[in-house]
Amino acid sequence: MLCEHKKIKKLIIFFLIVNFFVLPRYFVVSAVNEVGGVLDAEIQNLQDEITAKQKKIEELKDKESQYQQQIRQKQGEQATLKNQITTLDDNINKTEVQLQSTQISIDKTALEIKKVNLEIQEKEEDILQKKEYLKSLLQLMAKNDDKSALEILFTNTSLSEFLDQVQYLKNLNGNMQTVLDQVKEIKIALEQQQENLAKKKQELEELKTRLDEQRAEINDQKINKQYVLDKTRQSEKEYQKLLNSAKAEQNAANDSIVAAEQAIRAKLLEQQGKNALVFNEGEFLWPVPKNVITAYFHDPDYPYRNVFEHPAIDIRAKQSTPIRAAASGYVAKAKDGGYGYSYIMIVHGDGLSTVYGHVSRIDVKADQFVTQGQVIGLSGGMPGTPGAGYLTTGSHLHFETRLNGIPVNPLNYLP
């Protein structure tokens, strides 16, 4: 009879555990697993789409590289109208490929944002599941905690049963700590996913900006090509005349810049002594808003490299963007070339000077002192507009930095 009583008591304890622990957890886990399975499938589908987009981007990059090789090959050949038009066409095609790649990157990033959102949802569901699990554990522990240790001892017929129940309660506490640790880990992972989401959204906005810039660049390149065709009337003889005019213009500008710098430094030395110019604290600032650099210092991909080296960086800027002095100093030259090449030169301390080319409007004059950030004129660069010169590649600011009269890379001085 005593043995039968023990069996019934064990069965009652077993069903209590099922009621307060196993069954609630089973239903919660089943429901969450069903949701989690759907989310997993959606996440995998999105990943497959992302992988396909990435493959397409890589294919376009290969195509872009092919156009780049063709451009460099033509730049190494004789400077003829035919070669120049082919180079301009390849540049247009290359930019169109870049535009396609950017559009696909936008689509890919949108998919990645969707995927991260689903992963966040999945982790939130996982946290919910574990909360329900903890709730079940707490309910079961609360039921047992209502009894004192002495009561538990007397309700069990042997010390062995008492120790078993105490061990069971210890196991519940251990399970609770394990789940709490898991919740903390998931919460950390969730926060990381939310940071990733913010980064992806920022990346998406940057890609959209780049897309607009590339559209503008293609438009400028097409205008540039048409300008060359119109200016030369598709005649090789006229094209060679245009090249010679451009070379002469650049050489004259360089000679004038060197002479103007020497003259104003000598004048300042005579009037104010060695400390006439002290470079402003800090560094240069960007003369136009920091933007895409369309041509680098001595850029091997510069469209007119077979005509002359590029001693500057070209910063994309809309026509008539305000130009600001990169540092404080004296204006050494402010050349209004009409529809030819217009530029401004400023000398600074420490042997540095800056040149701002393709200027559509000049707001300063020679010998004038300007402070860092002061507006000195407006940018230009569109073919056939004031200040653009004979050969230009679209709206931008041509920005030179010189050290003791020798052009050096501006990017070494810009923040």
Image: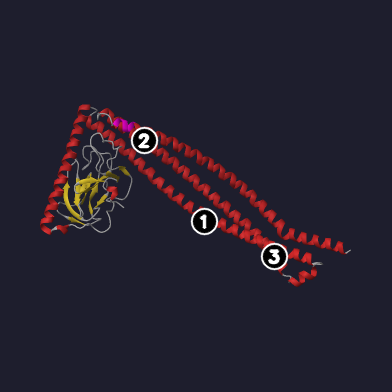
Place residue 85 in its image quadrant: top left
Residue beneath disc 1: 191
Q: Mark 2 is on which residue type? A: Lys
Q: Quadrant of the N terminus?
A: bottom right
Residue depicted at 62% across the width and 47% down the height: 37
Q: Which residues are magenta?
A: 70-74
* Helix, strand or loop: magenta stretch: helix
Q: Nearer the viewer, residue 221 or 56?
A: 56
Of residue 334 and residue 155, the one placed in the foreground of this image is 155
Q: Which residue is mark 2?
A: 94
Cα separation between marks 2 and 3: 69 Å
- Residue lying furthest right in this view? 1
Amino acid type shown at disc 1? Glu
- How packed mark 2 is, by other alpha carbons closer than 10 Å (few <14, some 14-19, many 20 or more), is many
In the displayed orientation, state which residue is furthest to the left: 270
Mark 1, secondary structure of its residue: helix
- Which of the two discs, 1 and 2, sits closer to the camera? 1
Is 180 colored magenta in this rendering? no
Give the alpha-carbon distance from disc 1 to disc 2, as whole Å.
40 Å
Vertical arrangement, residue 95 with respect to residue 264, above or below: above
Q: Position of residue 30 (x, y in %)?
A: 67, 51
Residue located beneath label 3 in the image: 141
Percent across and percent down for residue 287 are: 27, 51
